[in-house]
Amino acid sequence: MRRLTPEAVRFLAGPAARAELAALAGEPLYPLAALAALRKRWGEGEAAWLYDQAVLRRRARGKFPEADALLFEAEALEQASAWPVARWRAEQVFGPYERVADLGAGIGGDALALAAAGKRVLAVERDPVRAAILEHNVAALGLAGRVEVVRGDLRGIALDVEAAFADPARRREGRRSVRLQAMDPSFAELAGLAGRVPAVAVKLAPALDKAELPPEAGLGFVSLDGELKEALAGLGELAWAEPWAAVLPAGARLHGPEADPLPTGEPLRYLYEPDPAVIRAGLVRRLGRELEAAQLDPEVAYLTAEVLRSTPLARAWEVLEHGPFRQKTVAAWLAAHGAGGVEVKRRRSPVEPAVLEKKLRAALVSGGPVLTLFLTRIAGRPWAVLGRRP
């Protein structure tokens, strides 16, 4: 994509470019044809900027409401929170606070969500291109009265707010990093804000090393549609005493401390796979207590129970077959149940799901149901469980 400049943002925010982008929104975007048509009406640079924005708007539709009214920058869009996550955080984490700072606001995803939730927002962004896009996006959604955009570095800005949110950059030289001190600003710098602002929350990569967090920080994890989206560290008034998991879009929340060990053993009538936020927060046993479930193995995040209890915190399968893992045995199970497809999941198994799925195709029949095969270990033995969604 062509590098954006503040001049490019001014061009894209103008009425003529907005009209062109609106026309592109409903058309197929074949790169050569679209760029050729744009070059007939615009210069080389303008055509590239318009085409790139049309592409980015389509990518953004799953993350931003009214994406076709907004402007984007590729890397900032990739890092931006999905709208349901940003809105949930604005309402549930920052609910008690009226004035909130968004530090490193980027193109505005979190600032827009905070403003939409009724907060007064101080949006701080040091990159001039992203700051210009942020100003445009705030105005495009009619939120200029609630959002003050400040161009500069958070280190030198007075923060007259009740709470602050930070989503630090996690790329260096084009590579992602989950190390807390490799972020920009580093976590240590952001933790220092707790002395200036009563409540601070920092968005982190879900794969962070929990041992890197200082003991005074709280920690939670957020998933959306079964995909782990972010870790959230809390400081000051947001230094949660117990780890927690939030599962969206249901809005269900589970918090610790982790429960005592569960009974363990072979699968019962139903198998539960906890949501990844629950697993990452270390709350599998606590969820097991709520579901009155056992655990297949103390080291495996699968739960099992005789009675099915509906919960957004886990997905459930009815157990059809189970036993020590052997490929021939599994193939026989699939044939006996008339399976038309098989999805292989694994925990603590060395078997590659994609490889096994190919090997099992001969056991499948046309038109049959898609069943799920779980590969795991029970008491140190390789084990297989065949299930179907109830």
Image (spheres, rainbow, N blue to C red):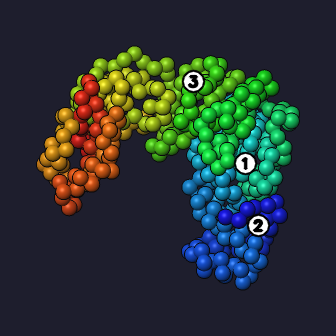
As drawn, 39 above or below 381: below
- The picture places residue 370, in percent across and down from the top left corner, at 26, 52
Point 68% across, 37% down: residue: 183
Given the current orientation, which residue lies at the most extreme top position?
A: 260
Q: Are marks 1 and 3 in contact (CB under 8 Å)?
A: no
**Would you say 378 lies left or right of 18 here?**
left
Occupied quadrant, residue 214: top right
The local secondary structure at tag 2 comes to helix
**Would you say 295 lies left or right of 284 here?**
left
Closer mark to the observer between disc 2 and disc 3: 3
Q: Which residue is mark 2?
A: 12
Give the quadrant of the N terminus: bottom right
Earlier in the chain: of badge 1 and badge 2, it is: 2
The residue nearer to you, when weighing 206 against 15, is 206
**Would you say 110 lies left or right of 347 here?**
right
The residue nearer to you, when weighing 362 against 311, is 362
Q: Amino acid at mark 1?
A: Gly
- The picture places residue 234, in percent across and down from the top left corner, at 65, 27
Residue 156 visible within the image:
yes
Q: Which residue is mark 3?
A: 211
Q: Which residue is mark 1?
A: 106
Mark 1 surroundings: few (<14), some (14-19) or many (≥20) residues within 10 A? many
- The picture places residue 157, in percent across and down from the top left corner, at 86, 36
Earlier in the chain: of badge 2 and badge 3, it is: 2
